[in-house]
Structures are given as structure tokens and as C-alpha cells.
Image (tube, rainbow, N blue to C red):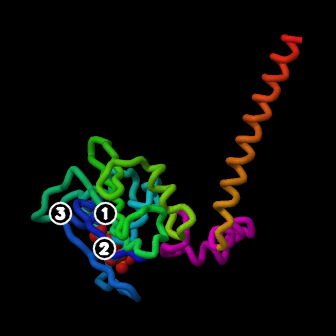
Amino acid sequence: MHLKRIELAGFKSFAKRIELDFRPGVTAVVGPNGSGKSNISDAVRWVLGEQSAKSLRGAKMEDVIFAGSEGENHRNVAEVTLVLDNSDAHLRLPYEEVSVTRRVSRSGDSDYFMNKKPCRLKDVLDLFMDTGLSRDAFAIIGQGRVEQVISGKPEDRRAVIEEAAGVLKYRQRKKQAERKLQDTELNLSRVDDILYELA
Ligand code: ATP
């Protein structure tokens, strides 16, 4: 799986619709300070389901919408699409190419699409879980994150190692199994009550 293309429109400093193509191998994005390099990685994290405006370097989610500049009116909608090559079937979808789109408007509407079909945030999170590209994975290391890890508390560092080792999915499955077990125990005690009443 690799990221083939990003399409941005009205997202942060990208007022007009643009497409960035990525070929396999290393791609470096270079440019002067403030030219929008980090906005590209923000766009990737945003599509992956990032819900914190702060970690996208804004105060509120609306701040991802192009706010206007000299000679360019502000936009009312921001839309970003990631196009991924899935010929190795790394994503559990039967398509060679998978696109994921997120759109937000100033009125507060927020939509997700998978291969252009509307879907829920949960579908996007589920799609990327276990792939190394989930919202909290380490495919994207932001500025200052390395220092945060090195000087962080041992528990925080452990979480980083667990995520990298893929332990997270088992932790979540364990939680789900425990929840099911609790529900089943509750059901069993209800059955016991009924049996007692019938006896
Ligand atoms: P550096 O090299 O300093 O880290 P950079 O190339 O990574 O810079 P970014 O941080 O990606 O640059 O982009 C910052 C620019 O994006 C600023 O000029 C800022 O005004 C612009 N920007 C951010 N949000 C918006 C928005 N909603 N509307 C318009 N412009 C925005």
C-alpha cells in the first residue's frame, strides 16, 4: 500500500483544487517557511480522522477551511482526498485503488467518503486500524514529537512502543471481549432469575 495522490481544495493554505502525486520511494516536499509544507501532512491526518483542531494547529475545526488571502476569497468548504494504491490488498477492501475523502463546511457539516460513497468516521477508522496508518499511528511524526517521546514519562513511551509493535489492536479486541463477557454474565443472571421464578 502506498499513498498515490492527495487532492486538496479549500484546505488551509490550498484555496484552489490541487493534486499532489507521490511515486513509490522517497518524496521530499521543500519550500520556504510558511509555504504550506506541514499543511500537507495536516491534510493527511485530517482525512485519517483527526478530531482535534489543536493537533492540526488550529483553534476550531473550521480553521482548516481556507480563510482568504490577498486576491483570493475565503472558501466555505474544505475537502481532501487520499488516493491509496491497494494492489497488495493491505486495506481490507476488494479494490486496487482506495480513495478516502473528508469534507467540512463552515455550517458545521462534516462528511466522509470511501471510493466516493458516503461513509462514517468509524468506517474510516476501522479501515486504517492495524495498517500502521491509523490516526494515532506513527506513520506521521510531527515536529516536536520525537523530543516528546524521548523526554516523556515511561508509560507514554510504552504506549509508543505498543502502538509500533501492533499491540493496540489486541488491547482493543480484549476490551471488546471483556465487554461481551460482561453482557453475557448479565444475561445469564437474568436467565437464573427467570428460572428461579419458574421453579
Ligand atoms: P515551516 O517551514 O515554517 O514549518 P510550512 O511550510 O510547514 O512552514 P505551514 O505551517 O504548512 O508551512 O503553513 C503555514 C501557512 O498556512 C501560513 O502562511 C498560514 O497563514 C497558512 N494557513 C494555515 N491555515 C490557513 C487557513 N485556514 N487559511 C489560509 N491560510 C492558512
Q: Mark on residue 5?
A: 2
Q: Indicate which label's residue lies in the foreground, 2 or 3.
A: 2
Q: In which quadrant of the rendered view does residue 65 lie?
A: bottom left
Q: Does the magenta stretch include residue 72?
A: no
User: What residue is shown at x 33% (from left), y 68% (from top)?
Assistant: 83
Q: In the image, is 96 to the left or to the right of 69?
A: right
* Of callouts 1 and 2, the N-terminal one: 2
Q: Which mark is residue 143?
A: none
- Comparing 192 with 172, the one in front is 192
The number of numbered badges drawn on the structure is: 3
Q: Earlier in the sequence, mark 2 or mark 3?
A: 2
Ligand 1 within 8 A of label 3's CB?
A: yes
What type is the residue that disc 3 sits on?
Ser
- How far apart marks 2 and 3 lie (CA) works out to 26 Å
Q: Residues at badges 1 and 2 in contact (C-beta under 8 Å)?
A: yes
Relative to 70, say whether 21 is above or below: below
User: Magenta residues, as a range?
Assistant: 136-164
Please say whether residue 56 is visible from this viewpoint.
no
Q: Quadrant of the C terminus?
A: top right
Q: Name the residue under label 1.
A: 81
Mark 1 closeness class: few <14, some 14–19, many ≥20 residues within 10 Å: many
Tell me where residue 189 sits by quadrant.
top right
**Residue type at tag 1:** Thr
**Residue 137 on image: x %, y %:** 55, 68
- Of residues 118 and 197, which is closer to you in this image? 197
In the depicted structure, whether residue 84 falls above or below residue 177 = below
The image shows residue 108 at horizontal and vertical percentages of: 32, 42
Q: Which residue is under mark 3? A: 69
Q: Position of residue 113 (x, y in %)?
A: 34, 53
